[in-house]
Amino acid sequence: MDKLRIDKWLWSARFYKTRTLAAEEIGKGRVAINGQEAKAACEVKVGDTVSVRREAVTRTVVVKGLSSVRGPAPVAQQLYEETAESLKARDEAAQQRRFAREPALSIEHGRPTKRGRRDLEEAQRGWGDRWSASIDDEG
């Protein structure tokens, strides 16, 4: 076997859990072969460069082998070799996530308690009478 469909290769190399997921990601334009956007039926051969964008990180790998069956993870990892730039970018992205501020910490008060919600509802009852955007004609 000298060529294999890209969706099948991505599945056998364990980039995606199913061929359907691989085909959907390819359809969304998140996979490129040798710098060109791929289609699910595109064929990949040994020596091709495949770029897979997942969760804001692009993994670039060189195809080292082809397999039409999905085997264990150690065997699947022998089907490709990740480039040095890709490894560096993944490490930087992991470090960025590690040092990033937790989004939940920016919420000062959070969701109101039952008592707080009742107080808000009580305060809002009279707002319709007091607050109006219209101009009152007191003539």
Image (cartoon, rainbow, N blue to C red):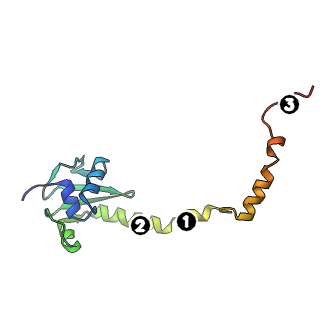
Q: What is the number of callouts on the image? A: 3
Residue 75, located in which quarter of the rendered image?
bottom left
Task: Answer few, some or many: residues within 10 Å of disc 2's Cα (few below 14, many 20 plus, some between 14 and 19).
Answer: few
Amino acid type, label 1: Glu
Q: What's the CA distance linking mark 1 and mark 2?
A: 14 Å
Give whichever of discs 3 and 1 has the lower sequence position: 1
Residue matched to label 3? 136
Quarter of the picture containing the C terminus is: top right
Secondary structure found at label 1 = loop
Q: Residue at x 41, y 63 (%)?
A: 93
Q: What is the x, y in percent for residue 117?
A: 72, 59
Can you tell which of label 1 and label 2 is closer to the viewer? 1
Residue that mark 2 sits on = 94
Mark earlier in primary sequence (1, 2): 2
| Relative vertical location of residue 4 with respect to residue 98 in this rendering, above or below | above
Instruction: Depth check: give the residue in front, 20 or 118.
Output: 118
Residue 133 placement: quadrant: top right
Q: Of helix, strand and loop, which one carries label 2?
A: helix
N-terminal of the two: label 3 or label 2? Answer: 2
- Picture quarter with the N terminus: bottom left
Q: Position of residue 109 (x, y in %)?
A: 68, 63
